[in-house]
Image (tube, rainbow, N blue to C red):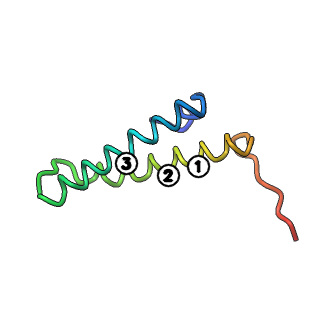
């Protein structure tokens, strides 16, 4: 799923999507451990998608808009 598609989701939808991704990652890790994984690159893609979902969810919770930077305190 693309980042702009995730940004259109609500926080609840995004959280449930993230939970699904984490569950899928756990299943793929088990398959990888017993050497039954067809596409090992899917693990890398899932890890990145989970990170993307977490980042967008955190931005939504903080009320940031895409591309907006937080002001740093000196």
Res 24 quadrant in image: top left
Nearest the viewer among 23 and 6 is 23
Which residue corresponds to mark 1?
55
Crowding near the residue tagged with mark 2, few <14, some 14–19, many ≥20 C-alpha atoms within 10 Å? few
Q: Nearer the viewer, residue 46 or 62?
A: 62
Q: Against 11, is 72 above or below? A: below
Helix, strand or loop at label 3? It is: helix
The residue under label 2 is: 51
**Callouts 3 and 1 close, C-beta under 8 Å:** no
Q: Which residue is rendered at x = 44% and y = 46% of the image?
A: 49
Q: Is residue 9 above or below residue 48?
A: above
For this view, does 41 lie left or right of residue 9?
left
Which comes sooner in the sequence, label 3 or label 2?
3
Which of the numbered marks, if any, corresponds to residue 46?
3
| Mark 2 and mark 1 residues within 8 Å of each other at the beta carbon | yes
The residue lying at 60 percent from left, 42 percent from top is 57
Local crowd at mark 3 within 10 Å, few (<14), some, or many (≥20)?
Answer: some
């Amino acid at each position: 799923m693309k980042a702009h598609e995730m940004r259109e989701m609500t926080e609840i939808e995004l959280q449930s999507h993230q939970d699904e991704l984490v569950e899928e990652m756990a299943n793929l890790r088990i398959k990888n451990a017993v050497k039954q994984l067809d596409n090992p690159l899917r693990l890398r893609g899932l890890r990145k998608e989970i990170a993307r979902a977490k980042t967008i969810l955190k931005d939504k919770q903080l009320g940031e808009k895409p591309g907006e930077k937080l002001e740093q305190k000196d």
